Amino acid sequence: MRALAYFRKGDVRFTEALEEPKIVAPDELIVDIAWCGICGTDLHEYLDDPIFFPKDGETNQISGLGLPQALGHEISGVVSKVGPGVQSLRVGDHVVVEPTGTCRDRYRWSTAAHPNKEICAACKKGLYNVCSHLGLCGAGVQSGGCAERMVINESHCFKIPDDFPLDVAALIQPIAVCWHALKVCDFKRGSSVLIIGGGPIGLGTILALNGFGCTEIVVSEPALIRRELAEKMGAITYDPSLRPHDESIEYLRSIAPGGDGFDYTFDCSGLPVTLKAAIRCLTYRGTAVNVAMWGDHPVSFLPMDVTKQEKRYMGSMCYTADDFLEVIDAFAEKKIDAEKASHMITDKIPLEIGVEKGIKKLITHKDQTIKVLMTPNNSGELC
């Protein structure tokens, strides 16, 4: 089938010969892909050493599968075939995919070549979003959504209303990332909020905050297009390039209620300067949440920046099935505005030009793009 696939480090390209997905486990189903978004993680996989994809000659710890694999884990589509054990979904259902691969999914690939291993401590505690072997469909575990079809087990697939736009539905996965961050940091309605970085996760955090009943939000972002979109979503914006870094921190602290910093900051950029800003822009006993994906590189950190004012710095990883269901419900209840969410989509392209007009454009034209969606259905029959 046609796909945009990762073959090895430095080799991501369109192909017409990726292996078709097949139902093996009884609870698996086939999804015909409508749309798949390009994520910042995909860009890291393209530019750097693989983060989730197996290295050349290796296989994934969950599935035992190697390369090539179709990219993509921000997925919407239509169910086209179901296995005999599928209970809640039918052919024709519109769905979104929760794309993690964890210890609880090993049974799908239980073969002599890759026998089941003991479940990790996190999965034993039910914390599968931080599984010790965590991977993603479309990033190492199995082929993802940058293809005509994919196979997935029922527990990772969620029905959406037939009249919900399938392009906006592809945004549910990144919004679920943000929704999960609000839950794990125990966000309190009425709190003051600073988002650092106005890319897809920063903008998704605005939408998730709306779903939690929060509308008074400040976003710090240097790119004009991203500030303009954040403003369309109702946020107050600030351009951190206007002042030296320390002066920007003091300014942001001053515009928080009370003038001494925010209750919560969300670092959606993942840079040393944004880590520093996330902590220093907090008020007393405030919480800084890292929602960005960092590379495997150490950074300078001053523990007393946290200790002196009893601040809290924490991370949030991925999402759970509950997060997906709650985001879908928030859209259905109009707590998250689908039209507002659609503003994040700046490009919609076919798979064939996914590298040049998708991945490379996001890398080189950050000032022009936010979320690029790809489709294998050029005629748009699913869209």
Image (tube, helix red, strand yellow):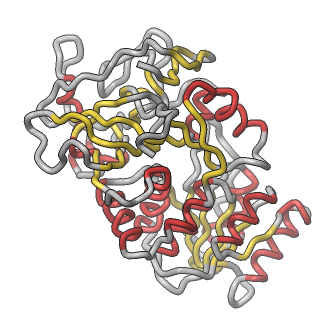
Residue at 62% over, 60% down: 343
Question: Measured along the vertical axis of the image, is residue 184 above or below residue 133?
Answer: below
Q: Is residue 308 visible?
A: no
- Place of residue 296 in the rendered image (x, y in percent of width and height, measured from the top left): 59, 35
The reply, left or right, for residue 160 in relation to residue 313 is left
Question: Horizontal placement of 83 versus 285: left or right?
Answer: left
Q: Identify the residue at horizontal 45%, vertical 16% (top origin).
A: 68
Q: Nearer the viewer, residue 209 or 309?
A: 209
When asked about the image quadrant of residue 80, the answer is top left
Horizontal and vertical percent position of residue 340: 57, 67
Q: Is residue 341 above or below residue 260?
A: above
Residue situated in front as seen by the camera: 322 or 329? 329
Residue 197 found in image quarter: bottom right
Nearest the eye: 155 or 15: 15
Q: Looking at the image, which residue is at 71% across and 31% down? A: 360
Give x and y (percent) for residue 41.
Answer: 56, 38
Q: Residue at left 53%, top 30%?
A: 51
Residue projecting furthest to the right: 243
Vertical position of residue 104 compared to residue 58: above or below:
below
Q: Quadrant of residue 286?
A: bottom right
Asked whether, in this view, residue 47 is left or right of residue 33, the answer is right
Q: Quadrant of the N terminus?
A: top left
| 367 shown above or below 49 | below
Visible residue check, residue 219: yes
- x, y percent for residue 89: 18, 48
